[in-house]
Image: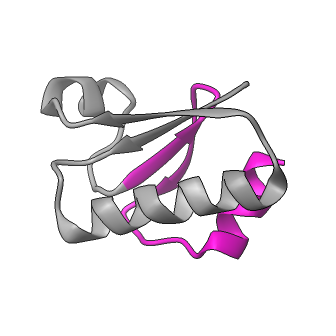
Amino acid sequence: MKTLQILGTGCPKCKKLAENAEAAARELGVEYELEKVTDINKIMGYGVMMTPALVVGGEVKIVGKMASVEEIKRLIR
């Protein structure tokens, strides 16, 4: 099971990144759990200063930008 975390305050880009991450995991047939982290202190705990960010399995993969479904698929394989 992959743990996918979206770090962000709930802005439209954060929501779109969450949608793309879910779509990528579904297309790959990967079992996943999606968590949205909105607490600024927890976000900063990852060393992230710009949102949205994507964390896969505890490792920050994307910071401060949107990623397409295809980009995310490459990161969660």
Residue 61 position, x and y percent, is: 59, 48
Residue 26 position in % (x across, y down) = 70, 54
Quadrant of the image occupied by residue 56: top right
User: In screen coordinates, is 77 left or right of 66?
Assistant: right
Q: Which residue is drawn at 31% across and 23% down?
A: 45
Residue drawn at 42 percent across, 55 percent down: 18
In screen coordinates, is 17 left or right of 59? left
Q: Position of residue 9 (x, y in %)?
A: 16, 48
* Image position, residue 54 (x, y; %): 49, 48
Q: How many labels does the image show?
A: 0
Q: Is residue 70 shown in magenta?
A: yes
Q: Please determine whether, in this image, residue 22 is positioned above or below residue 67.
A: above
- Quick one: 36 or 50, which is closer to the camera? 36
Q: Where does the magenta region start and end?
A: 53-77
Please name the residue shown 84% across and 48% down the image. 77
* 73 left or right, relative to 33: right
Q: Which of 16 and 67 is in front in this view?
A: 16
Q: How is the image coloured?
A: one colour
Q: In this view, does 43 lie to the left or right of 56?
A: left
Quarter of the image for the N terminus: give it.
Answer: top right
Instruction: Give the answer, above or below, for where 66 lies relative to 53.
Output: below
Q: Residue at x 82, y 48 (%)?
A: 29
Instruction: Indicate yes or no whether the magenta region holds residue 72.
Output: yes
